Image (cartoon, rainbow, N blue to C red):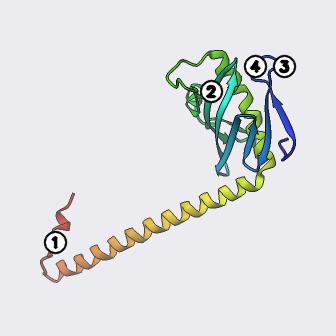
C-alpha cells in the first residue's frame, strides 16, 4: 500500500537496480528524478503520467489510462475493449528521442509495473477518486442542463414562429428554410 512516508519498490530493471517510488503528496509517487503523477478524472478512470521512468537503462516518458473493471480493480484500457485496443491506452516514448522505437522488453516491464502502482494509489486515495466522481457528475449534469436550456429556448422561439405563421404573418427571418 502506498502511504505518505512509506516506500514501495518496483523492479523495472535487473534486480539490484530498482525504481523506488515514494509518495510525497497525495497524488504523486516520486523517486529521485522519477515521478509518476496520478489524476482521478472520475470514479472509474485514472490518468497517470510518468516522467523519467527507467527500464533496461533507458529513460522513458509514460502516460496511461486505467479504468475500473467489474472486479473493482483498475486495468489498462476499458473492459469492453479487445486486448489489442487496450494498448492504445499506454503511451511510452524515449526521453530526448520520442520517435525512437520502444523495445518490447521495456514496454512489457513498464506495463507490468503500472497496474500495481495504480491500484495501490487508488486504494490509498479513495477520497480523491470520490471527489473526482462527484466533480465529473456535477459537470455532466450542468452540461446537460445547459443543453436542455438551449433547446428549450429554441423550442420557445419556434413555437412563437408557428403561432405567427398560423395567424398569417410572414416571418422576418428565414430560419424555417434552414437545413
- Percent across and percent down for residue 129 are 71, 53
- Percent across and percent down for residue 24 are 78, 46
* Lateral position of residue 26 relative to residue 178, left or right: right
Separation (CA) of disc 2 from disc 1: 59 Å
Locate residue 69: give its quadrant: top right
| Residue corresponding to mark 2 | 60
| Residue corresponding to mark 3 | 16
* Foreground: disc 2 or disc 1: 2
Ranked by sequence position, the earlier of labels 2 and 4 is: 4
Q: How many marks?
A: 4
Q: Secondary structure at mark 3?
A: loop
| Residue corresponding to mark 1 | 173
* Lateral position of residue 28 relative to residue 155, left or right: right
Q: In which quadrant of the rendered image does the N terminus lie?
A: top right
Which mark is drawn over residue 13? 4
Q: Are marks 1 and 4 in contact (CB under 8 Å)?
A: no
Separation (CA) of disc 2 from disc 4: 13 Å
Residue most toward the right? 6
Separation (CA) of disc 1 from disc 4: 70 Å
Q: In which quadrant of the rendered image does the C terminus lie?
A: bottom left
Amino acid at each position: 500500500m502506498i502511504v505518505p512516508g512509506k516506500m514501495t519498490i518496483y523492479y523495472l530493471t535487473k534486480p539490484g537496480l530498482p525504481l523506488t517510488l515514494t509518495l510525497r503528496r497525495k497524488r504523486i509517487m516520486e523517486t529521485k528524478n522519477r515521478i509518476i503523477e496520478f489524476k482521478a478524472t472520475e470514479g472509474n478512470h485514472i490518468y497517470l503520467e510518468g516522467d523519467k521512468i527507467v527500464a533496461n537503462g533507458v529513460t522513458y516518458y509514460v502516460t496511461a489510462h486505467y479504468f475500473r473493471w467489474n472486479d473493482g480493480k483498475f486495468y489498462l484500457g476499458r473492459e469492453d475493449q479487445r486486448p489489442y485496443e487496450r494498448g492504445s491506452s499506454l503511451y511510452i516514448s524515449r526521453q530526448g528521442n520520442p520517435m525512437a522505437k520502444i523495445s518490447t522488453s521495456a514496454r512489457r516491464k513498464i506495463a507490468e509495473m503500472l497496474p500495481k502502482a495504480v491500484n495501490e494509489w487508488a486504494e490509498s486515495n479513495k477520497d480523491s477518486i470520490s471527489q473526482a466522481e462527484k466533480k465529473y457528475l456535477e459537470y455532466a449534469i450542468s452540461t446537460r442542463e445547459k443543453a436542455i436550456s438551449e433547446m428549450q429556448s429554441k423550442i420557445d422561439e419556434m413555437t412563437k414562429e408557428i403561432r405567427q405563421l398560423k395567424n398569417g404573418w410572414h416571418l422576418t427571418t428565414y430560419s424555417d428554410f434552414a437545413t
